[in-house]
Amino acid sequence: MLVVARFERIFTLKTAFVTLDRLLVRLHKNKSELLMVLDRPEIPLHTNGSENDVRCQVTRRKVSGGTLGIGFWDYLRARLDVPGSHAIPPLPELILARARSP
């Protein structure tokens, strides 16, 4: 089969880059899994389904400032002066205070 021969030619190459050579060897070891889609075309070519499952939580964590411990909505309400919102220092002050604490 032409595809298998091409796979072998590509993934048995030796380059001048050790990291790339290691990657090619690792991928070559997974040949049966990587070429399974040729026998079973219903197998998805990506893992976006599982990635989408956690994307919402990751986005929320990034928007919330990760380890600053302040919720995004709390921060936004403070910036917009929403009545009843808690006072939150400016972001540079928060970052400096976090950097100083052990």
Image (spheres, helix red, strand yellow):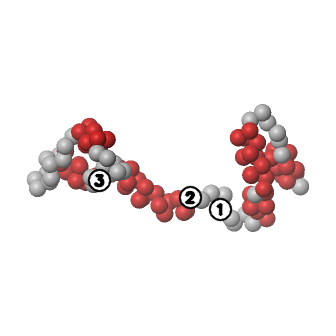
Image vertical order of residue 74 relative to residue 94, above or below: below
- At label 2, the amino acid type is Asn
Q: Which residue is mark 1?
A: 44
Q: Position of residue 22 (x, y in %)?
A: 74, 45
Q: With 12 as the anchor, is 83 left or right in this view?
A: left
Front in this rendered view, residue 52 or 78: 78
Task: Please tell me which residue is depicted at 65% across the width and 62% down the height of the picture.
Answer: 44
Q: CA distance from mark 3 to mark 2?
A: 29 Å
Residue placed farthest to the top in the image? 16
Q: Which residue is mark 3?
A: 69
Question: Which mark is drawn over residue 48?
Answer: 2
Category of crowding for the residue at label 1, using alpha-carbon neighbours closer than 10 angstroms: few (below 14), some (14–19), many (at least 20): few
- At label 1, the amino acid type is Pro
Residue placed farthest to the front in the image? 102
Q: With 34 as the anchor, is 79 left or right in this view?
A: left
Q: CA distance from mark 1 to mark 2?
A: 9 Å
- Dot 1 and dot 2 residues touching (CB under 8 Å): yes
